[in-house]
Image (cartoon, rainbow, N blue to C red):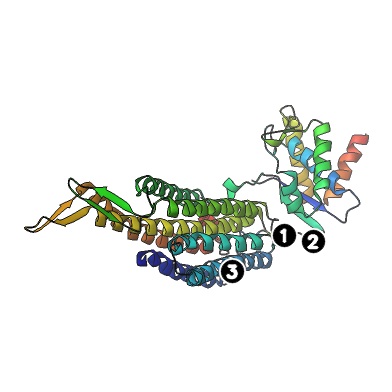
Amino acid sequence: MRLLLLPLVLLPIAALAAIVTTVATARTPTGTGPDVETSPDAYARARRHAALVAGLSWAALVLVALTLPQTIPFGPDQGIVLACAPAVAGVVALLVAAVGERTWPRPAASVRRASLTRRTVRDVAPHGAAALALAWSAALLLVLLGTGLTADPDDGRSVTVQHESSTSGAGPYPGAPYGVPIAVAVVVLLVAAAVTLHLIASRPAVAQVSTADDARLRRAGARRVLAAVQLVVGGTLAGVLLVTGNSLRAAATSGYDVGGGWVETTDRVLHTLGVCGLAAAPAVLAATFVVTGSALARAARETAPGATALVRV
Amino acid sequence: MSVHVEVDVTSGVPVYEQVRTQVVAHVAAGRLRPGDRLPTIRALATDLGVAPGTVARAFRELELAGVVVTRRRSGTVVADDAAPAHVTARDAAAAYVRAARAAGLTPDETVDLVRGALLT
């Protein structure tokens, strides 16, 4: 159970770092870059609005991730709620982001301009970030499917290994009682992400700002959303891998007293799988942190005035 | 290069008419080609800060004129038979606009000159 707390402790730290990065980079001095077609001031205001929306969204993520685990009462379902806490925090963060996207000022000047090019979620969502968020989700759902099928059918919360002349078991193991709620929470998170990305694509264009600059702001918003999603899903995957690996490694070895001494048998395949899970968990967690940091820094860099040349992705 | 529409909500010309004429002009100039997808009514209305019904009316007029067609899957696209203006006339128009701009003429004065030429 304590292992489950690891991602819950690290996620807020990463999210706090993300907020600091977002706010710090949002304060880059604004200038009159040649890419700002009409009004550098309008672009600077829009950039501040985008940073505020992102900051509030990430603050909500941290707040929920920090407070939710403390509100869970001790009991058999504590682990389930703990495992779903990152996804719940992610959904709350996306809700805040979605509300923020609805607050963009609508065109108010008498002369208004709009592009006749169709704008879709595919246009605003960076493909690499979207692919990574989906990859973490697919990996998590596959691991949960595997652990659900191999968990002890009696309780679904442990894994039992049949050795030649003995049986060994270990838990907690993310069988169906853990896997189904986590999977549902992740699917809800992905739906919330899709809705938020749609809102980013369909929000009003920033008045007095070129189409290219408006597109940069949208892409940065989508990048920040996807960074949060991959952090949450990747963190959950790391937690599941950690718990799974720990239980598999423990259950792979069975020891019993034969009268004349202690005999141990080890299922090497399961032991190796367990060790791989334990090794993969920190690697996944580290990768999500690195991706989050670089995505947020890139979002701020791309929207910096005069950064047009950097954005032709 | 992105193709735009620009409307003046204080103008005496209705907004839907401004949108309609500009889309027709973009097609005539070859900037919008047959098969090009236009934004959804809601998206264009949001960007322009006007009611969706205003853009819907412009699209309806364009559809009646055969400039665009609305398909269930791809939405509103430039019609296949909405050909741009004759290439020679198009080049002449572009050259005329360049000359008018160089002379400091406003868009209205530029169009007035064309209308005047058409009266001869």
**Disc on the earlier residue, 1 or 2:** 2
Above or below, A223 against B18 in this view is below
- Foreground label between 1 and 3: 3
The tag on residue A122 is: none
**Mark 3 or 2, nearer chain start:** 3
Tell me where residue B76 appears, x and y as whole percent: 72, 37
In whole angstroms, how far apart are the C-alphas of marks 1 and 2? 8 Å
Q: Mark 1 near mark 2, Cβ–Cβ under 8 Å?
A: yes
Q: Secondary structure at mark 3?
A: helix
Spatial distance from mark 1 to mark 3, Cα to Cα? 23 Å
* Pick the front one: A60 or A165: A165
In the rendered structure, which amino acid carries the disc numbered 1?
Ala
Please provide percent x and percent y for residue A9: 42, 69
Mark 2, residue position: A109
Q: Which residue is mark 3?
A: A56
Foreground of the two, A219 or A277? A277
| Residue farthest to the left, as pictured | A260
Q: Is residue A193 left or right of residue B117?
A: left
Identify which residue, A130 or A217, lies in the foreground.
Answer: A130
Residue A98, position as x, y percentages in the image: 63, 59
Which residue is at a point 70% across and 33% down the rendered structure image?
Answer: B72
| Image mark 3: chain | A
- Is residue A22 in view? no
Inter-mark Cα distance, 3 to 2: 28 Å
Q: With A22 as the anchor, is A36 left or right in this view?
A: right
Check chain identity for marks 3 and 2: say if they share one. yes
Which secondary structure, mark 1? loop
Sequence-earlier tag: 1 or 3: 3
Task: Inspect the image, locate mark 2, and give the three-letter code of the amino acid beneath it.
Answer: Ala
Name the residue at 90% across, 35% down: B118
Disc 2: which chain?
A
